[in-house]
Image (tube, rainbow, N blue to C red):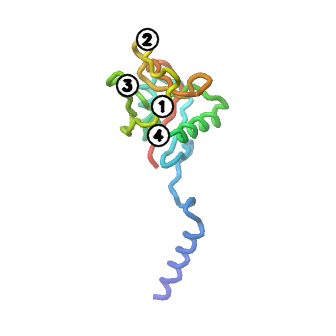
Amino acid sequence: MKLLTLPLLLCAMIALSRGAGDVSPTCSDNWTKIGSRCFGYVLTPMSWSEAEKNCVSMGGHLASVHSADENQDIQSLIWSITHNYKDTWVGGSDQSKEGVWTWTDGTQFSFKGWCRGEPNNSGNGQHCLQINYQVNRCWDDFFCEQKYPSICAKKI
């Protein structure tokens, strides 16, 4: 019994010495941990639906955004890769019902970072959500066929 106690004690000491941050799940290469999800920036411009299909093929969805801090973290991720705040697709859409915004991952659409006067459905066809719009880097509804880079998110 003493032979089993020593290895177990050593394992416990190693685990405790690492701290909670070191044993938490991480994201694979080309993904960045923000909160409890992994985010990946896709540089290739695509339509919103192509971008969503691409994210699904990688095990996620176009990113949903649930707080001002998360919005800022996503913007910082884009900046760190591009050194610019590029217009970028995320997973918000009101394609199913005008004015009712939903996320492609099925989470609740509660936080909103819309630009002043948005969403406005200008031209009767702006149903997809882009972030980093104009100098305020806020949200805008835009034509889904437009080709932009995108940000995907998946659970850890």
Mark 2 or mark 3, which is nearer the start of the sequence? 3
Instruction: Report x, y in % for residue 77.
Output: 60, 38
Mark 3 residue type: Asp
Upstream in the sequence, badge 1 or badge 4?
4
Report helix, strand or loop for mark 4: loop
Q: Residues within 10 Å of mark 4 (few under 14, many from 20)?
A: some
Which residue does the numbered mark 2 point to in the structure image?
Answer: 123
Which residue carries the number 4 mark?
66
Q: Secondary structure at mark 2?
A: loop
* Alpha carbon separation for disc pair 3 and 4: 17 Å
Q: Is residue 126 left or right of residue 17?
A: left
Q: Residue at x 53, y 61 (%)?
A: 23
Percent from the top left, x then y, of residue 105? 39, 38
Which mark is nearer the camera, 1 or 3?
3
The residue depicted at 64 percent of the width and 37 percent of the height is 80
Confirm or deny contact between disc 1 and disc 2 (CB under 8 A).
no
How far apart, in angstroms, are the residues tagged by discs 1 and 4?
Answer: 12 Å
Residue 94 in the image, given as x and y percentages of width and height? 37, 25
- Label 1 crowd (10 A; few <14 / some 14-19 / many >=20): many
Count numbered badges in the picture.
4
Q: Residue lying furthest front in this view?
A: 116
The residue lying at 38 percent from left, 29 percent from top is 101
Pointer 3 residue: 94
Does 93 appear above or below 29?
A: above
Position above or below: 60 against 96: below
Q: Which corner quadrant of the image does residue 145 belong to?
A: top left
Real-space Cα separation, disc 1 to disc 2, in angstroms:
21 Å
- Residue wearing tag 1: 90
